Amino acid sequence: MTCRETVRLICEYLEGRLSPGVAAVVSRHIDRCPNCHLVLEAAQKTLDTYFDGHTEASKIRVA
Ligand SMILES: [Zn+2]
């Protein structure tokens, strides 16, 4: 799998939408590719920020 293909799949990988076989290939590539590892970390942070913001908004609505 190339870096370009991996980067394209990282979002679905983080959301758990890939089939187990494809997720394993992506995971193996990320383990040995520092560039894709950085992209994964950045995407993970973006998702965390999004979900944190979502949680805050929910809290405000509940309060
Ligand atoms: Zn790569």
Image (cartoon, rainbow, N blue to C red):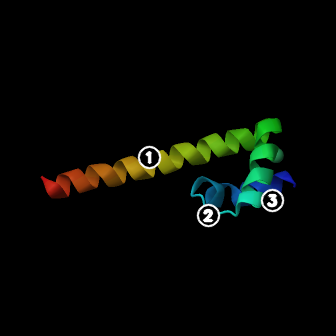
Q: Amino acid at mark 1?
A: Thr
Residue positioned most to the front = 20
Residue sitting at 66 percent across and 45 percent down? 40
Instruction: Residue under label 2, please give it.
Output: 17
Q: Position of residue 39 (x, y in %)?
A: 68, 45
Q: Which residue is mark 1?
A: 49
The Cα atoms of the two marked residues, 3 and 1, are separated by: 25 Å
| Residue 23 x/y as whole percent | 72, 55
**SS of the residue under disc 1:** helix
Identity of the amino acid at label 2? Arg
55 horizontally vs 16: left or right: left
Q: Which residue is mark 3?
A: 5
The answer to whether the residue bearing label 3 lies less than 8 angstroms from the nearest atom of ligand 1 is no
Between marks 2 and 3, how big is the CA–CA gap?
15 Å
Q: Earlier in the sequence, mark 2 or mark 1?
A: 2
Amino acid bearing label 3: Glu
| The residue carrying mark 1 has its beta carbon less than 8 Å from ligand 1 | no
Which of label 2 and label 3 is nearer to you? 2
Eyeballing the image, is 35 above or below 50? above
- 17 lies left or right of 26: left
- Is 1 left, or right, of 9 in this rendering? right
